Amino acid sequence: MFSLCLSSTYLKTDDGKNELDSLLSAIASGNKKALEQLYTLCSPAVYSFALSILRNEEDAKDVLQDSFVALYRQAEKYRPKGNPMAWILTITKNLCLMKLRQRKKDGDTPLEDLAFTLSAPEDSSPEDKIVIEAALNSLSSEERQIVILHAVAGLRHREIAKILDLALPTALSKYNRALKKLRKMLC
């Protein structure tokens, strides 16, 4: 089966989580170098998650930048308990929802045929990128978000359920349904 390894698995380890905690503490102290390091580690997951919600590259890039500005401003509010990526992606989700509300208010709905792209591994061929895009587009928006939060950000299903305001069994069911769809398409 084609691998959906879209970002470093480092963030999924305890060492990765501890490093994120340390970086957030340093950012709370005003360390801008720590913000750069956090951006380097987390931007692929944040961008992919924003893109999965917004389905518009420019809006996702805006939310990516806004997320890290918000992280810098709110770092002192972070309390190390659980997964720091869940906190980061909750900020991203809230900014995405604000962007969607603004779109609705302005009547600026993106065209359905806008290309949905996802950060694929750098060594991927153009064909692989097309396959990833097509496979993810076969999923519902919510299924796509769940897969990205699990595969890219390394969140546990309990954390995903909380971020997306779903019951845990619903999140698990949608994740399993999404995997079946992906297997069918990719195998």
Image (cartoon, rainbow, N blue to C red):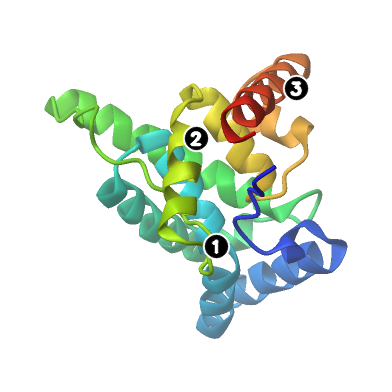
Q: Where does residue 125 sit, x and y in percent of width and height?
A: 47, 61
Residue ID for mark 1: 121
In this rendered view, identify the residue nearer to me: 94 or 127: 127
Residue ID for mark 3: 172
Q: Which amino acid lies under the numbered mark 3 shown in the image of this protein?
A: Leu
Residue ID for mark 2: 136
Q: Earlier in the sequence, mark 2 or mark 1?
A: 1
Quadrant of the rendered structure where residue 126 is? bottom left
Cβ–Cβ under 8 Å for marks 2 and 1: no
Which quadrant does the C terminus fall into?
Answer: top right
Give the farthest residue toward the right: 14
Q: Where does residue 33 sit, x and y in percent of width and height?
A: 54, 84
Q: Which amino acid lies under the numbered mark 2 shown in the image of this protein?
A: Leu
Mark 1 secondary-structure assignment: loop
Quadrant of the rendered structure where residue 22 is? bottom right
Which numbered mark, 1 or 3, is in the foreground of this view?
1
Separation of marks 2 and 1 at Cα, in angstroms: 15 Å
Q: Earlier in the sequence, mark 3 or mark 2?
A: 2
Q: Which amino acid lies under the numbered mark 1 shown in the image of this protein?
A: Pro
Residue 176 to residue 11: above or below:
above
In this rendered view, identify the residue nearer to me: 160 or 176: 176
In this rendered view, identify the residue nearer to me: 99 or 130: 130
